[in-house]
Amino acid sequence: MTALDPQDALALVRRTRAGLASRATPPRWYAPLYGLGCGTIVAAHALPRPGSWIATIAAFGLLVAIYGWWRRSSGIGVQGFRRGRTLPVTLAFGAVFVVAGFGAIILRYEHGLSWPALPAGVVVTLAGAWASRTWDRIWIADMERL
Amino acid sequence: MTGGAALDPVIHAPVRLQICAILSATDEAEFALVRREIDVSESVLSKHARQLEEAGYLSIRKAVLDSRQRTWLALTVAGRRAFAAHVAALMALVGGSGQS
């Protein structure tokens, strides 16, 4: 196999990454389902036991299932904490999830208030869907940009 | 080929360049996907993947899923660095600037 002129080599890299980018976009339902899974983990604290445990396990199962499905169907493995322009999105959503999650737990078990877990879960659902979609958009833009 | 001290001969061959281009955008990618994207035979991809692996740029992982063996390819840390340096050298040679 012959090696390439630098200009052609760069063009080949760009073409290859652009080709991958065109196939790497997850389906439209991925981000809302991801948000729903994350939000349910938080909102589950509004339920009495064992309902809260069942909802939490189901939500984790949903997250594992949708990521596993996408990984199998796309043939691409990528994790949220990879370095680059996507990392701030991951960290920002992580902060929302932790604050909302611990807030719901503290309010329930320290103050006896279970209802705040529901609006917290809605916030995490919306934030999760936004983070997932934004993360994908940046990742794909970086692929096309080189 | 245009010469250049910073160009990495292990990466610069077209198929290996394409393998690195795909893997640099992912944490790992399935062998079948890479083969489809590059449009080469299994044996050609295997040969080039092995050369990258021998250089310490690529790791190969086999996993059984749904009773089917799947092979996953990933750039190592050294491979990511080498590819980034290679792209930077290419850009310098063509007089551009940017990042991988």
Image (cartoon, coloured by chain):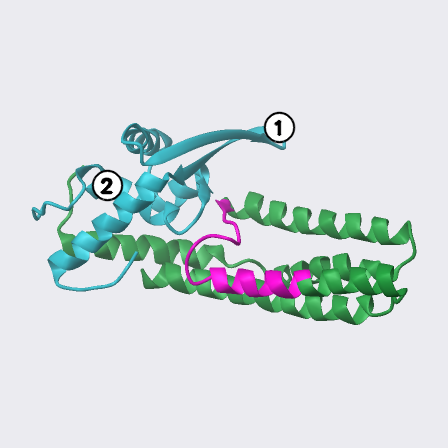
Q: Tell me where the magenta segment starts and ends, as one range.
A: A76-98
- Where residue A129 sits: x, y (%)? 63, 66
- Where residue B94 sits: x, y (%)? 13, 60
Question: Chain for mark 2?
Answer: B
Q: Earlier in the sequence, mark 2 or mark 1?
A: 2
Q: Which chain is green?
A: A
- State the residue position of label 2: B11
Tell me the number on the disc at residue B67.
1
**Front position in the image: A15 or A81:** A81
The kind of residue tagged 1 is Ser
- Residue B89 in view (yes/no): yes
Q: Is residue A65 left or right of residue A141?
A: right
Q: Is residue A52 left or right of residue B19?
A: right
* Magenta-span inclusion, residue A86: yes
**Front position in the image: B62 or A117:** A117
Q: Hue of chain B?
A: cyan
**Front position in the image: A127 or B28:** A127
The kind of residue tagged 2 is Ile
Distance (Cα) linking label 2 and label 1 = 34 Å
Determine the residue positioned at 33% across, 30% down: B53
